[in-house]
């Protein structure tokens, strides 16, 4: 249910959930190799190529030669990608609010805290 709400919210910006995730990681962590980005998201190589191709096609991310290893590329969020991510974060927050609407505010905060503990290092 949450995924369909998120897909609808992000779809209004032309983003798929995996594209949103990839763009979020690039903005938060800085340039990464395509392989590292895929590992970070738990996405297989083939899917990651399609995600990055779409981000690049839309001007949201770009591949640049890695200055430390000219055989590889690093992925960078573009200024447009950062702007779209800001809009996407707002859309994702609204989707989250819609999904959690049946819970009282106190329970929402508690749930988010518990989930952060599970996924944070």
Image (spheres, helix red, strand yellow):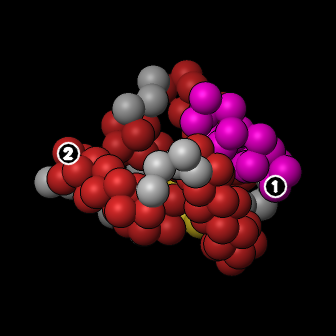
Region rendered in magenta: 1-17
Mark 1: give few (<14), some (14-19) or many (20+) Cα within 10 Å: some
Instruction: Specify the quadrant of the image occupied by residue 40.
Output: top left
Q: Residue 36 at x, y = what percent?
A: 36, 44
Furthest residue toward left: 121
Inter-mark Cα distance, 2 to 1: 29 Å
Image height of 47 relative to 116, above or below: above
Q: Is residue 49 magenta?
A: no
**Marks 1 and 2: in contact by CB < 8 Å?**
no
Mark 2: give few (<14), some (14-19) or many (20+) Cα within 10 Å: few
Q: Total number of numbered labels?
A: 2
Q: Residue 78 at x, y = what percent?
A: 66, 70
Which residue shows up at 66% across the image and 59% down it?
A: 94
Q: Does the magenta stretch include residue 11?
A: yes
Helix, strand or loop for disc 1: loop
Which residue shows up at 45% across the image and 56% down it?
A: 104
User: Where's the N terminus, which quadrant?
Assistant: top right
Image height of 13 relative to 102, above or below: below
Q: Residue 79 at x, y = what percent?
A: 68, 77
Give the mark toward the camera: 2 or 1. 2
Taking depth in this image into account, of 36 and 5 the one nearest to the observer is 5
Q: In this view, does 103 lie to the left or right of 83?
A: left
Q: Of helix, strand and loop, which mostly describes the magenta segment?
A: helix
Taking depth in this image into account, of 92 and 31 the one nearest to the observer is 92
Q: Mark 1 points at which residue?
A: 13
Q: Residue 24 at x, y = what percent?
A: 52, 59
Of marks 2 and 1, which one's residue comes earlier in the chain?
1
Number of the label disc, if any, that sits on residue 118: 2
Q: In this view, does 6 lie to the left or right of 47?
A: right
Which residue shows up at 55% across the image and 22% down it?
A: 46
User: Where's the C terminus, which quadrant?
Assistant: bottom left
């Amino acid at each position: 249910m949450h995924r369909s709400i998120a897909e609808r919210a992000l779809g209004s910006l032309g983003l798929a959930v995996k594209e949103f995730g990839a763009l979020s990681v690039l903005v938060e962590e800085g340039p990464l190799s395509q392989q590292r980005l895929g590992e970070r998201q738990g996405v297989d190589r083939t899917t990651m190529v399609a995600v990055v191709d779409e981000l690049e096609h839309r001007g949201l991310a770009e591949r640049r030669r890695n200055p430390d290893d000219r055989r590889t590329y690093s992925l960078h969020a573009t200024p447009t990608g950062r702007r779209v991510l800001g809009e996407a974060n707002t859309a994702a927050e609204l989707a989250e609010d819609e999904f959690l609407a049946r819970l009282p505010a106190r329970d929402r905060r508690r749930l988010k805290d518990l989930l952060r503990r599970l996924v944070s290092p």
